Every structure is written in structure tokens, then in C-alpha cells.
Image (tube, helix red, strand yellow):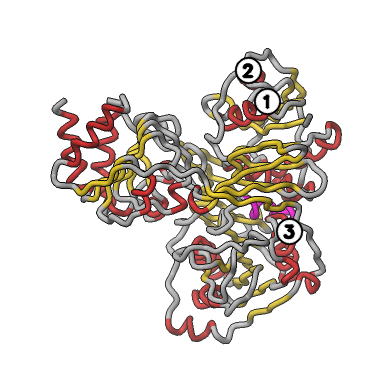
Amino acid sequence: MPNTWVFVEETEEGPATVGLEILTKARDLGGELSAVYLGAASDENFAALGAHGASKVFHIAPTDALPAAAVAAALVDLAAQHSPDLILFGLTYTDRDVAGRLSARMGKTILSNATDIWVDGETLKVTNEIFGGTTLVDSVFEGDGPYLIIVRPKSFVAEPSGDGAPSIETVTLPEVGHAGSAVVTGSHAETLEGPKLEEAAIVVAAGRGIGTEEGFGVITELATKLGAATGATRAIVDAGWVPYSKQVGQTGKTVKPDVYIAAGLSGAMQHLVGMKDSKVIIAVNKDEEAPIFGVSDLGIVGDLHKVLPKLIEALDNR
Amino acid sequence: MRVAVCVKQIPDPASPYDLDPDTHFVVRPADQVMDDTDRYGVEMGLQVAEQTEGTVTLISMGPSGNLQGIRQALAMGADKAVLVDDASLRGSDSLATAAVLAAAIKREGFDLVIAGTESTDGYAGILPQQLAELLDVPALTFAKKVVVEGDLVKIERQTQSGYDEVEAPAPALVSVTAGVVEPRYPTFKGIMQAKSKPVDTVTAADLGVAPTTQQKIVDIRPAPERASGEIIEDDGNAHLKIVELLEQAKVI
């Protein structure tokens, strides 16, 4: 029965959803379950962690430094006292920073991009997806733990267990000198209209096929009509046409909406991995060979600039 | 500044990858290209070096092949390359790779290390952070903009909801997102010069490291296939099929 820790970062909405997803999954593994929580102290947030299965919370209060170096150092000390078998992280920016530094500081490997964690007999196995999700890879750790795993968001569904408030242990961050000297001097939030990309029931996403930056207008218009979030491929984010926060895929967000409308995007592997588990996928692309058609419930070979305006009009007339 | 840029030669992503059935490793042909995401790191490194009258050294690990990918980065303007090519390192996990790269970077000396946030072929996405820890320097991660002012390195760091301004004094590591800068195309002169630029090929033993890999692939299997649906040509009324499907899905 493993002693499992789940690293959870605070977001604007409380403990990060991916953290709650991983806590939910970790309950299946049995044993002791604790959260390492980086965020402001709040009974509500602690209760949310408890309600998802953490019987204990190691609480770390954030500072104005980028936290990874000091948090990794603190976790090495903490692990020496409590001997966790597994330390789980979400595939997010700060989690990756902490996990990477912790790995190097402990001299322990990480299995990244996990979409499943399971026990086969006595062996812990970690599954991840390659080649755009068409191929599954099972890996095992060699040698002693703690075993570090980074889990892709939306691999599991967060469900409360109904457990009560956890016990809290406050963790003080050590001084780590030069390695900890990166400080945050300003913070900027992009104003987002409509639902959040990760939570929207419908996502309308576009790729290079929109032709120009202005071509995204029809995508936004359709999304507004449907109460949907807009998404984008890496290509048009790199081109500077839309902000990075809209990127869906390996290096962007993972989404699983009820309906995903993919317009003018070919379905590169790195995009498919972020959206292929959507319930219904509708694709519009001029190229009938586009890989996106391989995962679509409805594929339309045609010009998005013809199909989508008509779709908007049809929705208007309903 | 002495800038070390981590680059990786990978099989051309445009052609399907082969996996060795015994080792499960990606088969690496002699012709490998520079990972496209590394072009951004190389460009960023060149800009910092130009601004600070510094140098750019490429640091890489993997089978040399015909060095095509390394020459691409040298053709952009990097001064030289250190390539760790050692059969004993095949199948290294990211921590073992970071240990090797850290040793190579330390041997060369550095003020700034630049890496992409993740490679296109392996994409574990944690090597820059591991490398920073091994080098005992701050990691300015997920940078979408980088500015060097004297000894201070300032970045705009991607966040879930926007970006943060983050800074740290050199020596430091920066991981850059694709799009941080517009990579230059090699000039003809650059391509010719790249042929004679120094490429120092070394082994793990030369660097005094012998890292062990602590993970193993035990099975590779096809994912359950998603049944592909109906594909139609737009005859001017295809949008009605979308409306129909949206109604079935009960989202309108």
C-alpha cells in the first residue's frame, strides 16, 4: 500500500483541477494519501483537498519568487522524514518546474505525460500516449522510489470522496541561494471572453486554414453564437495570430468537450493529443487527406470560409 | 555572455517514426534534422550573444549521424558545438540526459543556458528544470520573451491565464517556447561556414559522468481506435449536417 503525495497548486478557482483529478485517481492505489499544497492558507481549499481524499496536507505558502527551487529543496527534506513511495504532479507550468528540480535534487527519474497509473501484480505501471494518441506505452520504474510521475490533465475525472477536513502540516521553505533567485515582478492576465477553454461544453478551434489573423473572426463569431470557447493549433499561436492561452495540444491545453469543431486544422499529432477524447468531433478542412478526418464523427471536405458563415446564419434562423 | 544552447537532432517529424521492437527506442537514421523547437533557442542565443558580444555553443547528446541537424544550427550562426555521442547512453531518461548535458555545459563554462521547453520526439518537458538544478542556477521557464540587461535576465513567463514578468541574475537557465523570436534562415555564407566550424564529439567518460536510467518501457500497444465517422464533400449544404449533429449532441 503506497504512501502517495499529490502536488497541488492553487489557482484562481482554488486547488488546481488537475490536482483534484490526480487525488481522485490516487485513492484507487490505496494506502496513505497526502497533498502537497502550494497556495494561500484557506479552510475552504484545505477542505476541497480533504474532500478529494487527502487525509493530510503539507501546506507551503507562496512567495514572490518562482517557487520550484525552494519547494524542491523543502520536499527533499520532507520526503526524508515521511518516505513517500509516489509523488504525483499535473502537467502544468509550475508542477513541471517543481517536479524537474525535485527529480534532479533527489536523483530520481520522472515518468511524464502519464494518462494512467495502475498496479499490475506487484508492479506499478505508468501509461502514456505517443504518436498523437494512437499508441500506448507502458513504462515501469527501475530501482528504489520515491517514484515521480507527471500526469496529463483530464486523464481522470475529479470526484469528491466525501472525506472530512485533512490535518495540516505547515512547511517552511529553506533558503536555496542563487538557484532560488528568480522573482516574479509583475503578473498579467489575458482577458478571456466566454467560457474557459478547459471547461467549455463546445470548443471551436482553428488552424492555418483560416488563412490570416483576421480569418479567426469567423471562429470567434461561431463560438459566441454557440456559447463555446475558441481554441487554436500551435501553428497559429506561433504565428502570433491568437494568444498562447488558446493553444490546444501537447504543448497547450487538453480539452474534452461535448463537441469539438476543428476548422482548417489538419490534425497534427501534437494537436490531436489535446482534443481526441472530445465526445463529438466535427472537422472542416479542404484537404480530404487531413488526419483530423480520421478521428472525426463528421468530416466536411470544404472551405471553412464558406461552411462556417452558412452555419452561423442557420443557427441565427433557428 | 557565454551562451550554451541545448539542441537535439531528431528524425524528420514529417516521416513516420520507427520503434526498435526489442529496445522500444526510436530508430535514428543518419539523416536527422534539428528539432524545430530548438530553432527558437538558437535564435534567442544568437541575439543575446550579438547584444553582449558573446558566444553561442551548441550542446547536444545523441547519435551523430551525418551531423545534418547540428550543421543547421551552426549555419544559423552558432560558434561551435559539443556533441555527446555514446552508445552507452542510448535510451537515457531525461535525468540521465540532463546529467550529461550539465557536465558538458560546465566543462565549456556558461553565463546563460537556453533550452526549448520540450523536444518534439520525446516531450517529457522537464529536462530544462532538471538541468537548472544540476547546474545550481535559477530556471526562467516557459519564456515567450527574453531580455538581457547587464547581468539580469528578464523574461515573460507563460502562465495558465496570461504571463508573469520574471527576472533572475546570471548565470541562469531560460526555457523558451516556440514563437519567442522569429528564427533566422541560414544564409549561403552561413551554410558554407558551418562546414568548418568545430564540432567536439565526446563520450560520457570524457565528461566524467556515468548516469543510469531508472525507467523502462515494458509494452507498446495500439490505443483503442476511435471509429471514424461520416466524411462528406461540401455541396453547399454541409452546414446543415453540422446543425443536425449539434442537435443530436443536445448542445443547441
Residue hosting label 2: A161
Vertical order, B149 against B196 (above or below):
above
Q: Is residue B139 visible?
A: no
The answer to whether tags 2 and 3 share a subunit is no
The residue type indicated by label 1 comes to Arg
Report whether A132 appears left or right of A149.
Answer: left
Dot 2 or dot 1, earlier in sequence: 1
Quarter of the view holding residue B210: bottom right
**Residue depicted at x 21% and y 50%:** A303
The span from disc 2 to disc 1 (Cα, nearest Å) is: 9 Å
Read off the magenta span.
B126-140
Q: Mark 3 points at which residue?
A: B96
Magenta span contains residue A117: no
Q: Which amino acid does label 2 sit on?
A: Ser
The residue type indicated by label 3 comes to Ala
Q: Where is residue B62 in the image (x, y as percent from the top left)?
A: 65, 69
Q: How crowded is mark 1: few (under 14 residues within 10 Å), some or many (20 or more)?
A: some
Q: How far apart are marks 1 and 3 (CA)?
A: 31 Å
Asked if B78 appears above or below B252 in the picture, the reply is below
Question: Is B132 colored magenta in this rendering?
Answer: yes
Marks 1, 3: nearer the viewer? 1
Residue positioned 39% across, 54% down in the render: A235
Note whether B121 is above or below A8 in the view shown: below
Q: Mark 1 points at which residue?
A: A27
Q: Quadrant location of residue B195?
A: bottom right
Q: Residue A51 carries which label?
A: none
Q: Is mark 3 on a helix, strand or loop?
A: helix
